[in-house]
Image (cartoon, grey):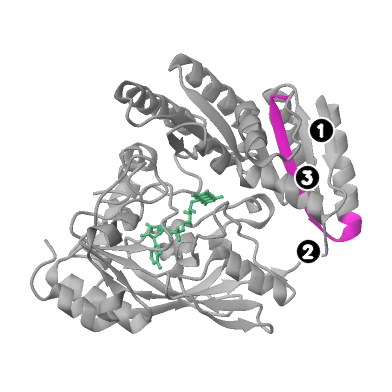
Amino acid sequence: MALTGQILPELKRIVGTENVLTTPEDLIPYSFDGTAGLRQMPGCVVLAKTTEQVATILKLANDAGIAVVTRGSGTGLSGGSLPSPDCVVLCTVKMDRILELDQANLTMLVEPGVTTLQVAEAASAAGLFYPPDPGSMKISTIGGNVAENSGGLRGLKYGVTRNYVMGMEVVLPNGEVMWTGNRCVKDVAGYSLKDIFIGSEGTLGVITKVLLRLVPKPPAKKTMVATFGQMDQAAEAVSAIIAAQIIPCTLEFLDRTTIHCVEDYAKIGLPLDCEALLLIETDGHPAVVAEEAAQIEKICRDHGCLEVRVAKDEAEAAKLASARRTAFSALARVAPTTILEDATVPRSELARMIRFVEAIAKKYKLKIGTFGHMGDGNLHPTFLTDERNHEEMHRVEEAFKEIFAEAIRLGGTITGEHGVGLAKKSFLPKFAGDAQMRVMRELRRALDPRGVLNPGKIFD
Ligand SMILES: Cc1cc2nc3c(=O)[nH]c(=O)nc-3n(C[C@H](O)[C@H](O)[C@H](O)COP(=O)(O)OP(=O)(O)OC[C@H]3O[C@@H](n4cnc5c(N)ncnc54)[C@H](O)[C@@H]3O)c2cc1C
């Protein structure tokens, strides 16, 4: 339904005129997210500041049957916060307060618009650690992280956002405010409802507060970079590190194309005469870190690595880590359109999957730079293309289909951390199967019978 009649004055009354955007030039920045090729102008954008405002807006929209698309910073890579036509974009970036840091229970209570980096810095200032670190952490919001169940570079050892959410306040589509979860380390009273909202991509409710779990800060860390002449050697070194029961906090890789783009962009001094680069970080007690680092170095050498460079100090460690953190931005400079995917396979299938992506690049005559969370089996084949070239975009789509089919065949998934949104929607039924699709549909219908929250995302 179009945004007509009393809705706009009502929205202005709820949040104030200055927090309702309606002019085309104000709406354009909200008409896309980080996903290439998707654009749609919303009906209006509303910047809410309180839970009460969110609840009133949802009740109003639900009664009027108007679609609401919740949005954090819009860095999503599956089109999750892309507006639907004439919808209200409900942006949470002004709900940006850290409400409490509880040293006794090691928790932090935050509003959804706080950035991941702000959470990490506030935890660190208190001598604590918030591990999830998506590459977008400088700008992505905690609300977006929870709604996507985002991963990051430390996922291998520390897990993903879900592992750090103890509870949340969520506004249901009818405007009802609900708390789920609490500060208790153990709680089995009823269904774990908070887990339904984690990764729900804005389709089941609007998260208005998050209770995060913090952990002690690791006292020591070592960062190293190992380079390999063949991609297979790097993949096998990763398998050997895990098989030796060493779980580094970071085990990331870059392929040749990505290494060259990063070096061109960030001038880190990376070796360019290699096919693959591993960024490895181990953290914990200093003695354990030293021992693990020595073992990792030996394993890399045993697998034919060309060079291992161990950071001498924090500054060098940050520089080496930036090789991975800048990978997406570096690739994005090379072609007008950058499509980043996150096909994920069991770790034992990594080498096979990487070879498959390389073969697909050749078959479809496409340029693909691949990097990713090697330790998690989470690959980011990144297509460097041009959305104006329709014939090439067709080849990109065909290549995707083959890559996802292969990931499923190898026991993997169509998305390890970016979510389904619009981008992966057509692949979900094949991956999830009839029973899961039916349960997901029934769950959504139960919570949002009028279908107002983020319609068309994940599934129709
Ligand atoms: C350079 C770059 C690097 C990235 N690196 C990573 C990475 O390492 N790991 C990773 O997992 N992702 C990564 N991403 C993807 C993206 O940053 C994450 O998905 C992030 O969590 C999105 O946060 P956001 O605030 O931008 O959310 P948005 O993009 O605004 O929204 C994402 C989804 O969450 C929903 N949503 C947002 N806020 C709320 C709320 N309060 N309540 C309910 N639903 C809500 C939206 O409706 C949408 O479906 C990267 C993106 C970029 C551009």
Residue at the image position 45 percent from the left and 56 percent from the top:
148
Rendering coords of residue 451 (x, y %): 21, 61
- Which numbered dot is residue 245? 3
Q: Is residue 57 above or below residue 70?
A: below
Mark 2 sits on what residue? 218
Q: Is residue 188 above or below residue 37?
A: below
Mark 1 sits on what residue? 300
Circle 3 SS class: loop
| Mark 3 nearby-residue class (10 Å; few <14, some 14–19, many ≥20) | few
Quarter in which the N terminus is drawn: bottom left
Q: Is residue 194 left or right of residue 121?
A: left
Circle 1 SS class: helix
Q: Between marks 1 and 3, how big is the CA–CA gap?
A: 15 Å
Q: Cβ–Cβ below 8 Å for labels 2 and 1?
A: no
Residue at the image position 59 percent from the left and 52 percent from the top:
152
Q: Main secondary structure of the magenta part?
A: strand
Q: Quarter of the image holding residue 244?
A: top right
Q: Earlier in the sequence, mark 2 or mark 1?
A: 2
For badge 2, the amino acid type reads Pro
Residue at the image position 80 percent from the left and 43 percent from the top:
224
